[in-house]
Amino acid sequence: MASPESRRSSACAPADSFASQRARMVETQIRARDVHDPQVLAAMAKVPREAFVPELTRELAYDDSPLPIGCDQTISQPFIVAVMIEALQLEGGERVLEIGTGSGYAAAVLAQIAGEVVTIERIAALADRARATLAALGIVNVEVGQGDGSRGCPAHAPFDAIVVAAGGPRVPDSLKAQLTIGGRLVMPVGTDQLSQKLLRITRAPDGHYAHEHLTDVRFVPLIGAEGWGATPDEPTAERR
Ligand code: SAH
């Protein structure tokens, strides 16, 4: 329900309407569901999600759901973005790798906390659009690369944190190897493409990787050399 104030502002000033919807999203969808990291809440309160969804669905930008962004892909539900970023346990200033740029929204949220974000998107049209959106918002600490991110980004490694926004059949060895000691990798993993377990993998000083199961999720597939094959139902295949 819109408050009298937000109803008034939506009639006269759409930007204010989005701001009040964003504030409400943080309270009702995120804080109310036990995401309490103040940096995550502040970042979600700041980034205009409406800038990352197609013009026609802009009014739905603060819905409690994923939304289509073209190319058969989606911008994740705000709550899931918050859960995944909180799970990275960022303190501020870190170097973060995101696989699956999509709209660029999660990268923009990460950029409010991290020092530097590298994000890789497989689909060139999405990478180009995300780059343009981030530039239009003046977000300068995100680098968008295009290609198969299932192998990570060795040129920029190591990373303090890695987040994968697409579901793979297993945790790619390449990503684990690109973590700093103590670094965290958060990724949906599942052996079918319909549901995954959200895992956090932490690299210990002795070379061991600790695994934690955080929750159950449903993501679009991670397609690539260390993900799924390019056609649906095809088991993991080497590509490129
Ligand atoms: N974080 C995004 C949502 C990601 S949807 C946002 O905030 O909008 C998942 C994205 O992962 C899709 O855009 C898909 O094209 C991309 N993807 C799938 N496999 C990939 C791979 N191997 N490397 C990079 N991106 C990949």
Image (cartoon, rainbow, N blue to C red):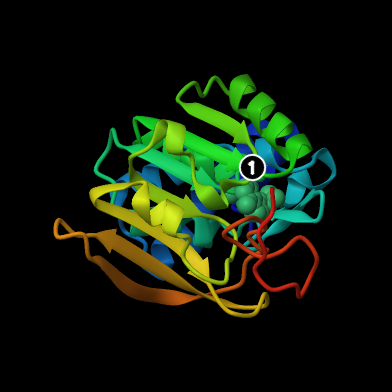
Dividing the picture into quadrants, the one containing residue 186 is: bottom left
Is 191 situated above or below 50? below
Q: Please indicate whether residue 75 sits to the left or right of residue 96 in the image.
A: right
Q: Residue 75: image x %, image y %?
A: 66, 52
Q: How crowded is mark 1: few (under 14 residues within 10 Å), some or many (20 or more)?
A: many
Q: Please state, as top left, top right, bottom left or bottom right, where the N terminus lies in the image.
A: bottom right
Q: What element carries label 1?
A: strand
Furthest toward the right, the residue is 56
Residue 45 in view:
no
Residue type at numbered disc 1: Glu
Taking the spot 58% from the left edge, 31% from the top edge, the residue there is 144
The answer to which of 77 and 191 lies nearer the viewer is 191
Furthest toward the left, the residue is 206
Q: Please indicate whether residue 96 sits to the left or right of residue 8 in the image.
A: left
Taking the spot 74% from the left edge, 54% from the top edge, the residue there is 73
Q: Residue 158: image x %, image y %?
A: 33, 39
Taking the spot 69% from the left edge, 47% from the top edge, the residue there is 240
Q: Please indicate whether residue 120 sits to the left or right of residue 43 in the image.
A: right
| Tag 1 residue | 121
Dividing the picture into quadrants, the one containing residue 169 is: bottom right
Q: Residue 161: image x %, image y %?
A: 35, 48
- For label 1, being within 8 Å of ligand 1 is answered yes
